[in-house]
Image (tube, rainbow, N blue to C red):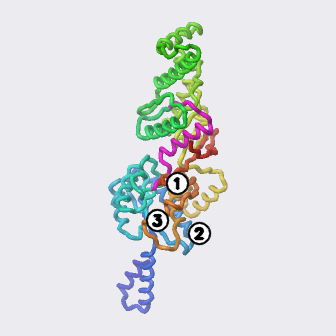
Amino acid sequence: AQTLVEDYLKKHPEHKMKNELVDFLKNKIQLILNTNRIGVILPLSGEFSEEGQRLASGIRYAEYEAKQENGDAINAETVIRDSESNMIRAIREFQDLERDPNIVCFIGELENIITAGLAGVAQASKIPLVAPTATDNGLANLGSYVFQASPDLEEQARALARYAFKMDSLRTFVTIAPHDAYGQQMVDAFSEEIDRLGGEIITQRWYYGVPENLGRLFKSIREIAFRRGLEDTLRLKLPNFAQLDKDSLWKDFNRRFMLENNENESIVELSSSYPVNNIDGVFLPIYQEDIQFVARQLKYFNINAQILGGEFWYLQDLEKNKQLLPYIDHTIFVSSYYFDPESFEYKNFRNRFRKKMGTTPEKWELFGYDTAKMIFSMLDQKKIGREQMRELLVTKTPFLGHKGLIRFQKGKRVNTAVHILQITGTKIRKLPHEEISF
């Protein structure tokens, strides 16, 4: 509207309503100068365009809803730019928007690595950046202007460890994970927390690539478990156990086992007949595409333990994956988000969202919506500065959104609220849990 009026005045400088139009422009410019603007950097094109567009849709709806609910009582708007799924482009768009003094904070990006790049620029510019989806450890430690609206991998793994130890009374664990940054971060945090609580990580095992054949890995776990059981028994019976050769004891046990049971193979090899029952939990922070391979092999090698997992266990359309259910049923996993598609609250939100945006809100829309709605909830008619915005982010949470809480506590700028979930038949259900410090 502003551009149209300016162009019209250039063509008709002596129009009889010139004064009214000039007043309109002055008011419009004054409104712009007094508006709190939120910069948004997302991949609207490129490799992650679908996820980026869904995030943007959630952000736009949060702005619409905030203005519908508050009217003139809120003085804020979003400005959305496309990173094109590219680090350099994202930083350029950030720098371009950052020159606008009305920009009080940023939301972005989607990918961990690009978000880290923006975090460095945001910290140098002393302007708050709220990352809606990034979960890499240490991102918020880049500076006091960086906030993670999703709990990082350390928060997730430690919360799951506390649940397993306290609520499920598990004490002994093995871990199996991909040998990459994700697997390493999850296993390290989980193991450290179990150690701190007084539990025991019996062994950690890693794999590379597609885990279609982990026979050697699972056999090694079976051997470790059976040797542990044998040694625990003999330790109680033999006063001089500490001085004995453990390898010789194990070999002797296997010889006697095969002789007494008329078997041609060791107990490790006979997985169908001899289950492992002395491991309480198996932590599997693995990718969604790996679950079918690892879960089936865990069952085949007869390791009877509670499966624990990370967010990639949040499987959609379990109805369509019923052949997998016998291998994954009752798995407990940690997630940064949760929504019950059958709840009245979600259905009501879904219908409003559909009516305005023309799509069904799911995971990515909820990440965008919750992050933006949290920021809008902190703003009113007053024009604020970037430092004031940072203080609001530090002091004005928790915020309850549709995917869960966003909570920055104890001086941390990482969301500490996680969900502990369980696969139960074809449903994902939320488990009650307390955040207890030991």
* Residue found at the very far front of the displayed protein: 239
Q: Position of residue 417 (x, y in %)?
A: 55, 50
Q: Secondary structure at mark 3?
A: helix
Which class describes the residues within 10 Å of circle 1: few (<14), some (14-19), or many (20+)? some
Within the magenta stretch, is there residue 355?
A: no
Q: Residue at x 45, y 75 (%)?
A: 34
Within the magenta stretch, is there residue 156?
A: yes
User: How far apart are labels 3 and 2 at the CA level?
Assistant: 21 Å
> Which one is closest to the eye, mark 3 or mark 2?
3
**Left or right placement of residue 361 versus residue 25 in this view:** right
Which residue position is annotated with label 3?
Answer: 389
User: Could you say which quadrant of the image residue 125 lies in?
Assistant: bottom left
Asked whether 115 or 89 is in front, the reply is 115
Q: Residue at x 54, y 39 (%)?
A: 161
Which residue position is annotated with label 2?
Answer: 69
Range covered by the magenta-colored residues: 147-174
Q: Is residue 9 above or below residue 373?
A: below
Q: Secondary structure at mark 1?
A: loop
Q: Taking the image as drawn, is residue 295 in sight?
A: no
Q: Is residue 206 above or below residue 49?
A: above
User: How far apart are labels 2 and 1 at the CA level?
Assistant: 28 Å
Q: Position of residue 147 (x, y in %)?
A: 45, 56
Type of amino acid at the residue the image marks with label 2? Glu
Query: Reading the chain from its start, which is encountered first: label 3 or label 1?
Result: 3
Query: Reading the chain from its start, which is encountered first: label 2 or label 1?
Result: 2
**Left or right placement of residue 240 versus residue 118 in this view:** right
Which residue position is annotated with label 1?
Answer: 409
Q: Residue at x 40, y 77 (%)?
A: 3
Q: Report the quarter where the C terminus lies.
A: top right
User: How far apart are labels 3 and 1 at the CA level?
Assistant: 17 Å
